[in-house]
Image (cartoon, rainbow, N blue to C red):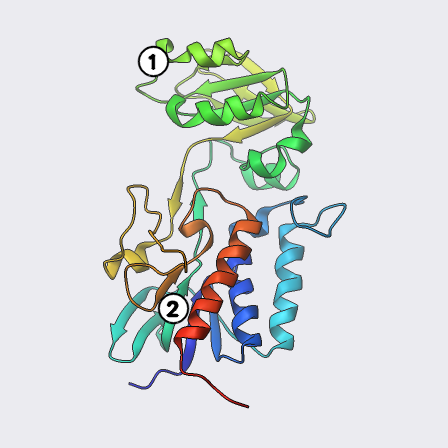
Amino acid sequence: MTARFDCLIVGGGPAGLMAAIYLARFRRNVCVVDKGASRAALIPRSHNVPGFVHGLSGADLIARMSAQLDELAVARVEAEVTALRRHDHGFEASSNGDAHAAVTVILASGIVDTHPPFREWRAAVADGLLRYCPVCDAFEASGQRIGIIGPLRRAAGKALFLRGYSRDVTLLAIGEDDEPGATSELTGAGVEVVFAPDPRLRRRGGGVEAVFADGRTLQFDTIYPAMGAEVRSQLAMALGAEHVGEGYLKVDDHQRTSVSGLYGIGDVVTDLHQISVAFGHAAVAACAIHHSLPRRFA
C-alpha cells in the first residue's frame, strides 16, 4: 500500500491544528481527522494565549486556526478514528468505514474530563462557574468562594494551589478511602475539608450550591472538579506504545512514541493541560516529521 499522506493527525484541537499548520507550511501532504469534540472548545475565555489582551474563547481559537488550515488547503475529515494499524509503508487509520493511509501519524486526541454530579455542567462551564484548570484561570477566580470536588489524594494539590488566590477555599472530599488524618497540610494552609461521599451540585443565584445527603448545603462562586480524566491514547496503546499508568504516552524530546513513526502531542502526553504546551509539542513534532521524510524540492 502506498501512503497517501505524509502525516495523518488524529485530533483537531489546538495541538493537532498547530501541527497541521506547521506541516502544511513545510509543503507536506497532511490530513486532520477530528470528530469535533475538542476539550478546548469548552473554554469560555482563555487569558493565557499571547497577544489577546482580553482573552479569547476556545471555540474562537479553533475557528481562527481552522481558517488558517483552509488557506493552506489542508485535508480535513470529520470523523472518529476507531482503529490504527501499521503496514509496510506507515499506517492505516479507519474512521466511519473509510481508510486513510499515511507515512507518519500524530496523536493529538487529548483527554475527556470526569465530570462532577452536576446536571448543568456544560452551561456552568460556559458561564465560568465550573472550571477545570486552575493553572489557566485561577487568576480570574481570585477572592472568590472556591470549591474543589474530588478524592482527597487527587484534589489536595489543586486546593493548595488555589489557596494562593483566595482565603475561602473548601475541598469536598468524595473518595471512599479518604481519611480525616490526611488533612493536616490542608487545614494548616487554611483549606476547609468537608467529607461528603455523595454531594450533588446545582446552580443557585449567581453561583453553585453543593447539596449533601443530610440536607446541608454550601454555596460557592466557582467549583473546580478534581476527579481525573480519560486519556484518549487507546489507538497508540493498541500498537504497543509505552505509557504511564494513567494512560499518558511516553515520548522523547522530538515527541516520538516508542512506535516508529507515531508521535504524541498535547494532553495525551502530559497532565499540564495548557494551550501553550500543546503549541510547543506541535512545533517540535512537525519539525521532526518534516526532517524524517524524504526531501522535496520546488
User: The N terminus lies in which quarter of the figure?
Assistant: bottom left
Q: Which residue is mark 1?
A: 179
Pick the front one: 230 or 69: 69
The residue shown at (39%, 19%) is 197
Give x and y (percent) for residue 81. 38, 65
Rendered position, 258 above or below 192: below
Question: Which secondary structure, mark 1?
Answer: loop
Where disc 2 sits, the SS reads strand
Q: As displayed, is residue 175 above or below residue 293?
A: above
Query: Furthest residue to the bottom?
Result: 298
Q: Quadrant of the C terminus?
A: bottom right
* x then y, percent, for residue 288: 43, 67
Residue marked by disc 2: 105
> Tag 1: Cα neighbours inside 10 Å, few (<14), some, or many (≥20)?
few
Q: Which residue is depicted at the point 49% across and 79% down?
A: 28
- How many dots with numbers? 2
Q: Amino acid at mark 2?
A: Val
Is residue 138 shown left or right of residue 201? right
119 left or right, relative to 89: right
Q: Position of residue 176 (x, y in %)?
A: 32, 20
